Every structure is written in structure tokens, then in C-alpha cells.
Image: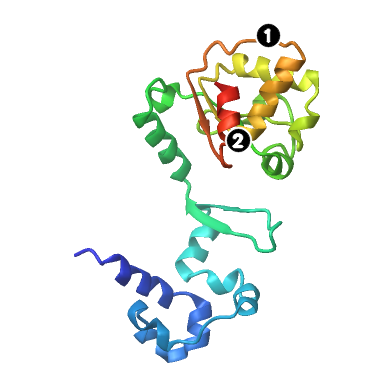
């Protein structure tokens, strides 16, 4: 019999070392419905207990066996957010997108160009920016950005990106809308007339998509 979500969360919470330390033997009686009976955790306590205090034995074992992927925000706002997930998470997400959006087809024919935010491009996406082949990620994803500030993209940068979109036969662009809008504006200003021969779909991710940016991109 499947447990309810509430019961599942109860069991997960009971396995978290921080809660085990704070609640002692009482942790066995933990229930979300009775959580008001337990002490409220302070922000310093939460921060000081990271990361081991938040990792269950099962999670630590999975990390040791490299069974999961981890990721985090930059922490520029003062606190990082960490995400742990299955190695198949992104592949499953891409398959889901391919199944519901026309023109993309199966994952085998999915060729994605990733054009992300300045933060992402400056810390993760092009940390070691190299030739095209070194920037291909599974499944079928090419990292395109090479500049932390889209306003600073040069004519050569724009030309390279346009050429790589065609060389890799990108049929799906996943972009930050503001960043991509600036890219297209610079492409226009530089007089670069390259067309994207295989492109079928653009999705807007990572940031809010202002109406003016969407209209310009269209």
C-alpha cells in the first residue's frame, strides 16, 4: 500500500540528522500534524547544520555512489539553494518536453542549444569555455554562451554563436529571454544576416519573459 505524501514526509524528516539531534527520542513521534509541538528552527541553526545535518543516510550513500546529481544557486542573495536529483532527471524532462511540443520529435532527434543568463554563463556554463565539441552535454545539448555580460558580446562572439547553431543543427533553443533578446539586437546592429536553418522551437527559461522581449524575438 502506498503511503500518503504526508506520511512519506514524516518518515523523511525522521531520517534527517539535524532533527534527530534536536528532538532525540521524540523524533520517533514526529508528525507534520503535530509539528507545532516541536521547537522552531532558527536561521543560524539551519545554516550551521549544512550540509551533513540535512542529508539522510540514504542520501549520503547515494552521493557516495554517484547515483544522483547535485546543483545549487550562486548564493548571491545570501543563501544558496541546493537541489539533489536522479541522474535521469534532466533526460526525463527533455523527453517530456519532446512529447508535448510539436516539431521536436523524439529525444534521438533533439538538438538543443542552451543560451542562458549572465550568472549561469559566468559561473557554470562556460567555466572552461572551449571548442564546440567540449561544450556538448547529454542529452544532445550545446552550450552557446561565452560572455558574462550580454551587452559585451562582440561581433566575433555573435558570428560564432550563429555558426555553431547551424553546425550543430540546433532545432531547439532554450534561452534566457532578456539575454537572447540582447543577442538578437546585437546581431541586427552588427549586420549579421545568418539564419538558423534547423530551428523549430524556442523556449524561454531561467528568467521572467517581458512582453517587449518576446515581441522583439518574434
Give the residue at x 53% y 79%: 18
User: Can residue 141 be seen in this snapshot?
Assistant: no
Give the residue at x 65% y 25%: 133
Residue 179 picture location, percent across and down:
66, 33
Instruction: Kindly identify which residue carries mark 1.
Output: 193
- Distance of label 2 from label 1 (alpha carbons): 22 Å
Which of the two residues, 114 or 140, is positioned nearer the viewer here?
114
Residue 209 picture location, percent across and down:
56, 37
Instruction: Kindly identify which residue carries mark 2.
Output: 176
191 w.r.t. 18: above or below: above
Quadrant in which the N terminus appears: bottom left
Which of the two residues, 48 or 56, is positioned nearer the viewer here?
48
Residue 73 picture location, percent across and down:
63, 53
Q: Is label 1 in a helix, a strand or a loop?
A: loop
Query: Picture quarter containing residue 102?
Result: top left
Query: Given the current orientation, which residue lies at the most extreme front position?
Result: 212
Q: Residues within 10 Å of mark 2 (few under 14, many from 20)?
A: many
- In the picture, measured across the screen, residue 116 lies left or right of residue 146, that is left
Q: Earlier in the sequence, mark 2 or mark 1?
A: 2
Q: Residues within 10 Å of mark 1 (few under 14, many from 20)?
A: few
Q: Is label 2 in a helix, a strand or a loop?
A: loop
58 w.r.t. 127: above or below: below
- In the picture, measured across the screen, residue 163 lies left or right of residue 201, that is right
Amino acid at each position: 500500500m502506498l503511503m500518503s505524501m504526508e506520511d512519506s514526509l514524516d518518515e523523511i524528516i525522521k531520517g534527517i540528522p539535524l532533527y534527530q539531534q534536536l528532538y532525540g527520542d521524540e523524533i520517533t513521534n514526529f508528525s507534520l500534524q503535530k509539528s507545532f509541538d516541536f521547537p522552531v528552527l532558527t536561521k543560524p541553526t539551519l545554516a550551521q547544520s549544512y550540509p551533513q545535518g540535512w542529508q539522510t543516510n540514504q542520501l549520503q550513500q547515494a552521493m557516495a555512489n554517484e547515483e544522483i546529481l547535485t546543483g545549487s544557486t550562486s548564493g548571491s542573495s545570501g543563501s544558496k539553494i541546493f537541489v539533489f536529483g536522479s541522474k535521469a532527471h534532466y533526460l526525463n524532462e527533455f523527453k517530456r518536453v519532446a512529447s508535448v511540443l510539436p516539431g521536436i520529435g523524439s529525444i534521438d532527434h533533439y538538438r538543443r542549444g542552451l543560451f542562458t543568463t549572465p550568472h549561469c554563463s559566468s559561473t557554470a556554463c562556460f567555466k572552461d569555455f572551449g571548442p564546440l565539441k567540449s561544450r556538448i552535454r547529454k542529452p544532445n545539448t550545446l552550450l552557446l554562451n561565452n560572455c558574462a555580460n550580454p551587452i559585451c558580446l562582440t561581433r566575433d562572439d555573435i558570428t560564432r554563436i550563429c555558426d555553431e547553431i547551424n553546425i550543430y543543427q540546433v532545432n531547439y533553443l532554450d534561452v534566457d529571454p532578456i539575454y537572447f533578446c540582447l543577442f538578437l539586437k546585437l546581431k541586427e546592429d552588427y549586420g549579421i544576416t545568418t539564419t538558423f536553418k534547423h530551428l523549430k522551437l524556442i523556449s524561454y527559461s531561467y528568467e521572467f519573459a517581458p512582453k517587449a522581449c518576446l515581441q522583439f524575438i518574434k
